[in-house]
Image (spheres, rainbow, N blue to C red):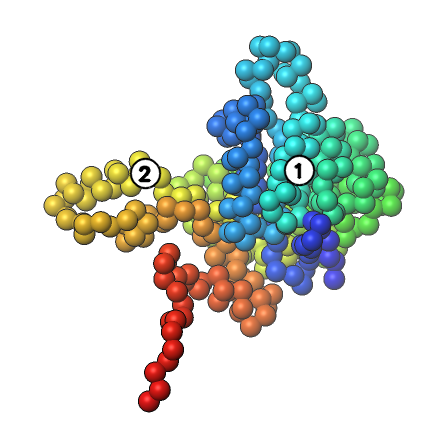
Amino acid sequence: MTRTIVESKTKTAIIGFDQPFCVIGERINPTGRKILAEELERGDFSRVEADAIAQVAAGANILDINSGAVFSNKMAEDPRYADNNFVEPPLMREMVERVQAIVDVPLCIDSSVPGALENGLAAAEGRPLLNSVTGEEERLELVLPLVKKYNVPVVAISNDDTGISEDPDVRFAVAKKIVERAADFGIPAHDIVVDPLVMPIGAMGTAGLQVFTLVRRLREELGVNTTCGASNISFGLPNRHGINNAFLPMAMTAGMTSAIMNPVALPTGPKKIAEKKAEIEAAGVILPEGMDDETFVQLFGMGSTKPRAGKEMEAIRAANFLTDNDASGSEWIKFNRVAPKEGEGRARTGRRRRG
């Protein structure tokens, strides 16, 4: 069986055909997150640390760390900040050091900047996953030597100099090319995790079927593990969680062994709570005096005021159980065990009266 080993200083994550599905948490990424990017520009890493803790608590096995921040304000002071080759290497090192100081899961070093990749690899303890290499000639020549030098596994994305093809046969050929070129560097197939590229189902009706077919071919013909950006499948559609929850177990049964995704259901904020309370009061419903916000949001099906595992994690854990990758359902039972409320204990204290 093909197994890809990813390690931190103290923990090991195994991506493999005979292993539970591996969740790679994607939240530590300033791309499209304006507030996070602004905080990083100020040297504030508190949100990075909070995202790391929340994702691990939700069940992430590996944390992806992406350093692709844009420092807009600093550009006006120093034009070098307009260049990601200047911004990302020191930022990546700092992010890696901050994250591994507070959580002990393996990391995935994610950047398009070679200097950031090398800084991340140098700072990471253990054996991180590198994200990523493509079939583009320049990228192969830049990244594969790093993979060999640090003896780490790598995500291989199925696009090349011609771009992303809608033809699954072309994407398979690109993946095969990367595996073969990696072999020239002495990098074994079990250290390559192929991303066959998930297209949005809203734009291409065959996107799901394409991925399932590709994953089977990659497993059977190349013997490699696979991953994907899971939320791409539902891009632009309503009820994205519903699509994702169906897609992930189907991809797993086709042979996909990991996904880069958000494992966390974000907390319900005070604004939404206030709006819901106003709506309820306008309908003439009187709430019990002193009801706390957490009880309120749970009562009205609004989730939770705290970060928690998302619905996608529920679907993955159920699929692990159904595919016999959760021995005796122990993880499923643990995941669904209701924790006692604050101040409540599971056991009574004091002596038991004799009869």
Residue 270: mark in rendering: 2
Q: Nearer the viewer, residue 207 or 239?
A: 239
**Residue under the point 30% across and 52% down:** 295
Residue 292: mark in rendering: none
Q: Nearer the viewer, residue 73 or 208?
A: 73
Q: Position of residue 113 (x, y in %)?
A: 70, 28
**Residue under the point 18% across and 50% down:** 289
Q: Residues within 10 Å of mark 2 (few under 14, many from 20)?
A: few
Residue picked out by circle 1: 97
Give how far apart the Cα atoms at labels 1 and 2 are: 32 Å
User: Which quadrant does the N terminus fall into?
Assistant: bottom right
Say if residue 219 shows up in the picture. Answer: no
Q: Is residue 291 left or right of residue 268?
A: left
User: Which quadrant does the C terminus fall into?
Assistant: bottom left
**Residue under the point 65% across and 28% down:** 91
Residue type beneath disc 2: Pro
- Residue 146's quadrant in the figure? top right
Q: Is residue 167 above or below residue 11?
A: above
